[in-house]
Image (tube, helix red, strand yellow):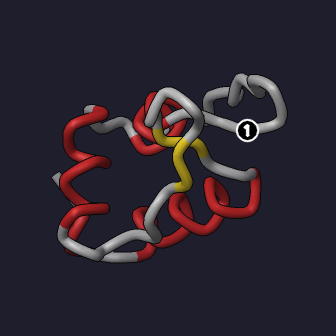
Amino acid sequence: MAVERKLKLRAGHYRVSDIAKQVDRSTMAVIRWEKEGLIPKAKRDSRGWRIYAKEQVDEIVKLVKETKYFSK
């Protein structure tokens, strides 16, 4: 049974580590999925860090949980 983890909202957005925790994968896996076009591309902040809106996080988590490609 998967454990739901609370997302940490930072300045109105979430980071790649928040998604990784939600789907129990590494941040590098999430970044690879983005590069491969399997999940929506993140916006970037002034430092170039990936940032996600709540809706994006929900969409990605749903996609990962419903798609066999992402299973371990």
Residue 64 picture location, percent across and down: 40, 64
Residue 42 picture location, percent across and down: 50, 56
Crowding at dot 1, Cα within 10 Å, few <14 / some 14-19 / many 20+, comes out as some
Q: Image point 39% across, 69% down: which residue?
A: 39
Secondary element at tag 1: loop
In the image, is residue 64 above or below residue 51?
A: below
**Is residue 59 toward the left or the right of residue 63 in the image?**
right
**Is residue 34 toward the left or the right of residue 18 in the image?**
left
The amino acid marked with disc number 1 is His
Using the image as rendered, state which of residue 20 and residue 68 is in the foreground. Answer: 20
Q: Image point 16% across, 51% down: which residue?
A: 72
**Is residue 25 toward the left or the right of residue 2 in the image?**
left
Residue 19 picture location, percent across and down: 50, 41
Q: Residue furthest front?
A: 46
Q: Image point 29% across, 38% down: which residue?
A: 25
Using the image as rendered, state which of residue 65 and residue 42 is in the foreground. Answer: 42
**Is residue 42 toward the left or the right of residue 33 in the image?**
right
Residue 12 picture location, percent across and down: 83, 35
In the image, is residue 67 above or below residue 47?
A: below
Q: Which residue is mark 1?
A: 13
Q: Image point 55% across, 33% down: which residue?
A: 15
Q: Quadrant of residue 6?
A: top right
In the image, is residue 14 above or below residue 43?
A: above
